[in-house]
Amino acid sequence: MKPLAMSLLSFVAFTCFLNGPAFAADKPEIDPAAITRPQGYKPYAGDARELAVLGEKLWNDTRLSSNGMSCNTCHANHGAFQASFAKPYPHRVAMARDKAGVKRVHLDEMIQACMVMPMAAKPLPWASKELAALTAHTSKLQKSFRSDATAPANPCSVRHANPCALRPVNPCAAK
Ligand code: HEC
């Protein structure tokens, strides 16, 4: 009887460890693999000007999301970008860290993070022309970004009333 009681106890303890609040709190809402460069990653390499043109088109394309948004819906005039966007990549971005547990992101990883979270879509194929194009366009935007100029135009900022949070389906929330 005694060994059985012992193993029952340790089984219960183990199950509590797996399902307990500590474990649940640590589990990210978003699978970090979805927004992390795969092993042996080779980004699409193409004509820079062509990529920039395609990138600007995709930036405004609502078909990329499942919720009617385009990147520009939130990021027009540098809206929604936080101070971290001014820093060279890779760097820490609150959204990636809080929702996916990813500590530092490259620019293309951040694009995937916005695809998966606010755009409520699948990540783009890593070696795709589309991801390279959006990376080229976003990199261009980063050059003219100043962290002190973001606040007024930011629809999803944590520092201001968040209109996304008022809608029944919150596009800023992770799906
Ligand atoms: C519903 C609003 C929304 C949409 C749509 C959206 N984003 Fe974002 N994005 C955000 C927010 C909010 C942040 C700030 C996250 C943070 O700093 O924690 C952000 C941050 C970023 C950053 C900068 C992160 C940094 O600080 O380095 C990039 C780059 C970015 N988004 C790219 C995109 C791209 C590309 C698209 C379209 C595929 C897109 N976003 C669509 C809300 C959005």
Image (cartoon, rainbow, N blue to C red):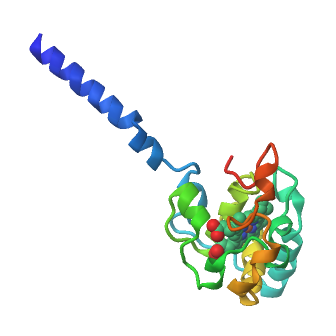
Q: Position of residue 118 (x, y in %)?
A: 73, 57
The residue at the point 65 percent across, 62 percent down is 113
Instruction: From the top left corner, tell me how far across and down residue 13 is, in percent.
Output: 27, 30
Q: Is 153 left, or right, of 88 in this rendering?
A: right
**Residue 19 in sight in this render:** yes
Q: Is 151 displayed left or right of 91 in the figure?
A: right
Up/down of 68 relative to 169, above or below: below
For residue 98, side relative to residue 147 (left or right): left
Residue 128: quarter of image:
bottom right
Q: Nearer the viewer, residue 70 or 9?
A: 9
Report whether 163 appears left or right of 114.
right
Q: Is residue 127 visible?
A: no
Horizontal and vertical percent position of residue 168: 80, 43
Q: Indicate the position of residue 16 as horizontal and vertical percent values.
A: 34, 31
Q: Quadrant of residue 124?
A: bottom right
Residue at 41% across, 34% down: 19
> In the picture, residue 45 is in which quadrant?
bottom right
Ligand 1 found in image quarter: bottom right
Residue 167, compared with residue 70, is above or below; it is above
Foreground of the two, 71 or 80: 80
Task: Looking at the picture, tell me which residue is in the foreground, 161 or 96.
Answer: 161
Q: Is residue 123 above or below residue 89?
A: above
